[in-house]
Image: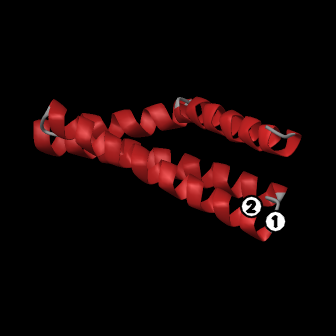
Amino acid sequence: MDTATGLTLGLVVAAFLLGLRHGIDWDHIVAISDIAATQESKRRGFFVGTLYVVGHASVVILLGIGAIALGATVPGWLDAAAGRIVGVTLVLLGLVVLASLVLERG
């Protein structure tokens, strides 16, 4: 194995491991638990949570491939905007959970 191949393999492994770490950040745990908790059965909750995980991973992979293909870097303002979007999304998910508890379960 030459140096370039080893470096590429190392970067792929590191990206994979960092992606796994990213998946257990608090915002992901909250989003998945909110979505799963509103389902009628544990099986449905597991299924919907899995859909969230697969969808999120697909978007991250596609955006990453696009950035690599274009040789683009992520500007700082985009990171800050994405953080705000995540915050709003979590608040909305929380409201959905509260509404479902009040409306469906009394």
Which color scheme did the rendering employ for the protein?
A: secondary structure
Residue projecting furthest to the right: 3
Relative depth, front residue between 84 and 48: 48
- The residue at which mark 1 appears reads as 71
Residue drawn 33% across the image and 48% down it:
51
Circle 2: residue type: Ile
Location of residue 42 in the rendering, given as x and y in whole percent from the top left corner: 17, 31
Callout 2 touching callout 1 (CB < 8 Å): yes
Left or right of 31: which side holds 45?
left
53 in relation to 26, above or below: below
Location of residue 46 in the rendering, given as x and y in whole percent from the top left corner: 25, 35
Circle 1: residue type: Gly
- The residue at which mark 2 appears reads as 68
Left or right of 96: which side holds 81?
right
Please say whether residue 106 is visible from this viewpoint. Answer: no
Residue drawn 24% across the image and 41% down it:
47
* Quarter containing the N terminus: top right
